[in-house]
Image (cartoon, grey):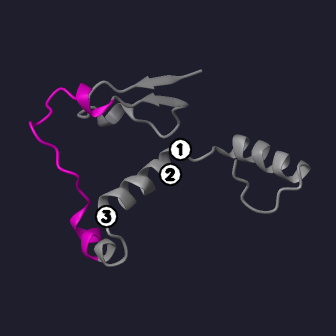
Amino acid sequence: MKFIIIEKLDIPDENKNDALAIRMPIIDVIAKKPDFLPLSVPKEYLDELSNFHGDPFIWFAGQILNYLMRFNNDFQSIVTKKMESLNIKSPCVG
């Protein structure tokens, strides 16, 4: 098993697409952290996001989190097979 450890944000070469796992430190571990980090959204998306969401940062952060937490193909296959065996047709809560 191959692990890529990222200790600082300024090491882009170590973040390979074929990594099985990466370590992403919490914001408090960043070496050159400024005194204040405002909640931000890329400028090119801000106007349009503001039109349909009251808090654009929350929506944007949710999209990033959704991407980071997505299933890989093997696990998605396992989940799909289990849902089919349980005859789940719609979202199941609880």
Checking the image for residue 42, the label placed there is none
Q: CA distance from mark 1 to mark 2?
A: 5 Å
- Residue 44 belongs to magenta span: yes
Please identify the quadrant where the N terminus is shown.
top right
The percent position of residue 25, horizontal first and vertical second, equals 34, 28
> Neighbour class for label 3 at 10 Å: few (<14), some, many (≥20)?
few
Mark 1 touches mark 2? (CB < 8 Å): yes
Check the image and name the residue furthest to the front.
Answer: 94
Q: What residue appears at the point 36 percent right and 71 percent down from the top-left corner?
A: 53
| Residue at image coords 38%, 31% | 24
Q: Nearer the viewer, residue 79 or 51?
A: 51
Q: Which residues are magenta?
A: 26-47
**Label 2 neighbour load within 10 Å: few <14, some 14-19, many 20+:** few
Q: Nearer the viewer, mark 2 or mark 3?
A: 3
Pointer 2: what residue? 66
Q: Amino acid at mark 1?
A: Met
CA separation, marks 2 and 3?
17 Å
Residue beneath disc 3: 55
Could you tell me residue 44's position as x and y percent?
25, 70
Provide the major secondary structure of the magenta segment: loop
Looking at marks 2 and 3 on the same chain, the residue that comes earlier in the sequence is marked by 3
Residue 69, numbered label: 1
8 sits left or right of 52 in the view: left
Report the residue at 16% width, 44% height from top.
37
Q: Assign a secondary structure to mark 2.
A: helix
